[in-house]
Amino acid sequence: MTVSFHRLIAAIGIFLLAGVFADADAMPAFARKYDMSCAACHSAFPRLNQFGEHFAANNMRLPNWKDGTMSGGDERLALPKELPLAVRAQAYMQARQADNINPLDGSSRSATTDFQSPYLIKLLSSAPLSDHITYYFYAIFAEKGGNGEVVVEDAWFQHDDIFGTGTSLMLGQFQISDLMFPREVRLPFQDYMAYRLAGITYDRGVLFGRDLGPVEASLGLVNGNGVSSSFDLNSPGLNRPDNMFDNDNSKTAFGRLGTDIGPVNVGLFGLTGKQRSITGPAGLDEGLHNRDKEVWGLDASGSIGPDIHWYAQFLHNRWDRFIDGGPDRDYEWSGGFAGVDYIPNDRWAYSLLYNYADANDLDDTDTIYEGIDINSLTLTASYYFMRNVKGIAELNVDLQDKEDKTGQYWTGHLSREHYFLFGFDAAF
């Protein structure tokens, strides 16, 4: 959706009439600050329990948040006495059946066993800054073999009561999909694939939220092009010192309405915006046009007794005239996931996760987007040596039928993707 400046101001006014919640990654800095166990907020780290969800919804603070701060005699200053930092580290050994296939010439490479250590090293920080403002960020120092680079993903400020309206405001980088099920606090190593395929993970923008009686309402605007794009201003000629993070005039609008129906929380999600078309061999190149994009979804979650927690997500996507040079048509596809976490005691946690997506209209387009098709089942077992240190073993079974090359390019599900991994995950 293209939003002019005046419409943007009007939209913000409407949003103010609509509590953003922020589910953070495992944060031992909170445990140190408030002198409490990680078990206060996590049923099995990084999964949040009911108190942890309340803590996050309360702008990630307790009423005594000023304890342990210093003011220097200034009542308008509350600095943490120690810089609130935490580290999360992961290391794995993986055996996998999968190939890296060049879609242009069909050449491939693979490695059936892999030492993935470190898989991830992450530095996190968060603290209240005032009675209503909290910050949160984390930086990744290594992920998936990408050593020698630092990537900031979540990074935001949040005010929990702007202008005394009871409306919260978050400004910064965050995941759109966090409105449903935050990826950072899932128990399985396997991802919630529908969110990645739909392109509703990290972006830059603003998010408003408010409790409207039995309904939680969240509405936001983001640039719509992820968190890696920017360009210099020159106006024209000599470079100005500033950058634009959005590469066009469009903004993506999204929101969710959630409520409890008995023991089940249900939500309705919607998004409308623009995305760049694709072109070139196998659809590998970015096109020249901004095309309309729509996503709507249904989510539900609940618990069975104190030990079993379930969740489910469905997403339907419409990408208008997505392929440059292709038929003048809209492409629709759908996907989702469902999972169950079983936490019988403080030592063991078990998870079952099913991912499914159907490329639908993108099938037989001879583009890499035929690879949206996914059908996998993942079983995870976690053993907790300590509250914040666990060993993990995970088996993923690829149920999607292997396909043969049918078009000019090597696209589609050409190899199976079974894997087994084990390793360690710690936060400290």
Image: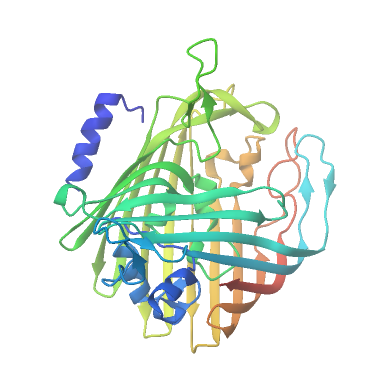
Which residue is found at the position 71% from the left and 69% from the top?
Answer: 92
Which residue is most to the front?
A: 73
Left or right side of 354 for 145: right
Q: How is the image coloured?
A: rainbow
Identify the residue at horizontal 17%, vertical 47% (top origin): 163
* Residue 82 in view: yes
> Camera-side residue: 425 or 157?
157
Q: Is residue 186 above or below residue 381?
A: above
Q: Could you say where residue 265 lies in the image, as x and y percent from the top left?
A: 30, 67
Quadrant where the N terminus lies? Answer: top left
Toward which corner of the image does residue 62 lie, by quadrant?
bottom left
Pick the front one: 97 or 149: 149
**Above-or-below relation of 271 to 95:** above
Q: Is residue 328 visible?
A: no
Locate residue 96: give its quadrant: bottom right
Instruction: Give the answer, above or below, for where 420 lies relative to 306.
Output: above
Q: Position of residue 19 (x, y in %)?
A: 26, 57
Give the position of the C terminus as an image quadrant: bottom right
Residue in the image at 21% along x and 32% along y: 10
Residue at x 63% of width, y 38% of height = 364
Tag count: 0
| Residue 58 x %, y % | 29, 65
Using residue 7 as the reference point, say whether residue 354 is left or right of it: right
Q: Position of residue 42 (x, y in %)?
A: 44, 76
